[in-house]
Image (cartoon, rainbow, N blue to C red):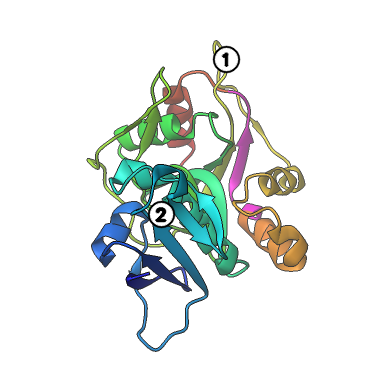
Amino acid sequence: MDHSINFESFGVSIELQSDVKLDLEFVKSLLPCIEESAADRDPDAIVSLVTDVPQADRGLFFDNERVAEIRGLEIPDLQGAASKLQLLIALHAAPTYLFLHAGAVTLGRKAVLFPGSTHSGKSTLTRAFLDSGARYLSDDCAVIGEDGRVHPYPVPLKLRTNGPSEHRAGDPYSVEDKPCEIAMIISTAYSEGAKWDPEEQERGDLVWSMLSHLFWPEIVRKHPEETFGRLKLIVERPLLLKGPRGEADEVVKEVLARL
């Protein structure tokens, strides 16, 4: 590889080697929470971005294994590679930080977290909160620190259309800039025709359900005590609500009334 750039994210140092020249700003356009790594620090992982070869051989490589295919060097072409870099950071950052599939916003420095799987409506719910004046933390990746606070991870808001493509909204919203204590966790998914009528969720049940939303589920086997301890800390104080929802505005109205 002719070029390389070293960067850090949540205490993890990555050396990204490439056959084309990259800069830190370009990496920041793919991943949030990136800063230049110290010159004297050894990387935690080395990955290679190969682009100047036939299409079938292009990709992001880690430990000589291709972990993501790519089409070109435009940002939409590299979203798969960015997702794999995000997963690699989550792997090395654990258990200091837990990466959780969840939308997250803040209302007066109080964080509202809504874990969920793909297609559960996290992004739609996130935008509904933002349209009501909330500040943006993330729509897919909530990063939880050792103190149980959720850290900003402001990737561009993603909204799926009826087709196979994704519409990536701009950034007209106010972004939270500091870790925040979680005041409420909502377990919900969109169901056509459903009426939002939540009930309080048992804390133990929520801990077990959140295991399925970790970016790197194998962390439970590698760091069982730390992982369960962190999840218990996360759910210890917040109000926990669960239930199917219809329109996102119904959820927002309920949350605003409770907070």
Mark yes or no: residue 24 visible. yes
Depicted 65 relative to depicted 211: above or below: below
Q: Position of residue 105 (x, y in %)?
A: 41, 45
- The amino acid beneath tag 1 is Ala
- Please name the residue shown 52% across and 44% down the image: 102
Depicted 200 relative to depicted 250: above or below: below
Per the model, the C-alpha gap separating discs 1 and 2 is 30 Å
- Please name the residue shown 26% across and 58% down the image: 26
Question: Image quadrant of residue 18?
Answer: bottom left
- The amino acid beneath tag 2 is Tyr
Mark yes or no: residue 149 visible. no
Instruction: Work out whether residue 237 or residue 98 is closer to the camera in this orientation and state it.
Output: 98
First to last magenta residue range: 235-244
Q: Position of residue 135 (x, y in %)?
A: 33, 46
N-terminal-most mark, 1 or 2:
2
Question: Image quadrant of residue 224?
Answer: bottom right
Residue denoted by label 2:
153
